Amino acid sequence: MTPITPTWALFASAHDSSLLSAVTQHHAGQRTHYQVNNFVSVVGQPVKGIDASSALVRIESTAPVILDHKPADAAQIIVFRGVTQHLHYTGKEDKEKLTVESRVPVAAAPNTTAVIIPIRKSAAWWALTQDQRQAFFHKTKTSAGHTNIGMPFAGKIFRKLYHSRYTGTPLPYDFVTYFEFPTELTADFQDLLKQLRDPKTNPEWESVEMEFEIWMTKVSED
Ligand code: HEM
């Protein structure tokens, strides 16, 4: 059986786009370039220093990504990290449906929006057992649950989930979630966020104690 190779991602943001270019351009991984348009704080303490004048680069690689910068430049660069994992809470039926229906990445263009949402869940969430956490993703008598809320949007919104608890470094977030869609679908994405964050339709989100959004244009891919 072929092992699933995880994808390691590093997102680096800076106001000085030439510095960002210099520290990311020699890496062997695949690079995507973005312009930040908006920063939205949702809950908890967000990272500081990213705004509509920031540039951002994502490097994806089959090995952990290390930035090659001078120590003096470190303060000017904000970094998020994560690595893809096997599915934890998705059954065979949902997996097959999502495989067929899920949108593929959207080409870089002036009207392609990308959104990064780093998320941290509470210690109480991580103290739950596997079956307790899994139950939150599925429909109950009173709530739709994460998977059922997301399913109708899977064909419209490209999504990628990077886990940050397995990067070897303690980080102030557990996940870096990443999305792409044509800008005209912004209202659909906002609707999805609203449903996921409503504890009545998705009680899982009561465990989210830190969350913020970085809205960007996907400018180009190397
Ligand atoms: C586009 C529609 C979406 C679909 C179809 C979807 C579906 C899913 C599924 C099936 C999982 C479980 C993965 C597993 O089995 O390990 C999951 C996990 C997750 N999703 Fe979504 N999702 C969507 C949108 C979103 C959005 C907009 C956010 C952020 C605001 C989000 C944040 C997360 C997070 C943080 C996890 C990991 C949770 C954990 O492991 O505790 N998802 N998603």
Image (cartoon, helix red, strand yellow):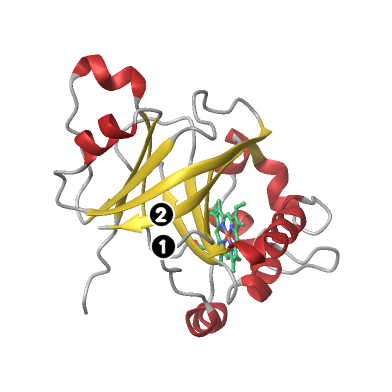
Q: Which mark is residue 146?
A: none
Q: Quadrant of residue 143?
A: bottom right
Q: Which mark is residue 108?
A: 1
Q: Amino acid at mark 2?
A: Val
Residue at 57%, 67% in the rendered image = 157
Q: Is mark 1 within 8 Å of ligand 1?
A: no
Question: Looking at the figure, which quarter contains the N terminus?
Answer: bottom left
Q: Is residue 119 in sight in this rendering?
A: no
Q: Mark 2 falls on what kind of element?
A: strand
Q: Mark 1 falls on what kind of element?
A: loop
Residue holding disc 2: 219
Where does the image place residue 182, in percent across and percent down from the top left? Answer: 56, 66
Residue at 21%, 76% in the rendered image = 2
Residue at 29%, 37% in the rendered image = 168
Where does the image place residue 35, in percent across and percent down from the top left? Answer: 45, 44
Q: Is mark 2 within 8 Å of ligand 1?
A: no
Are the residues tagged 2 and 1 within 8 Å (C-beta)?
A: yes
Where does the image place residue 119, in percent across and percent down from the top left? Answer: 55, 41
Residue at 76%, 54% in the rendered image = 194
Q: Amino acid at mark 1?
A: Ala
Labels 2 and 1: the sequence-earlier one: 1
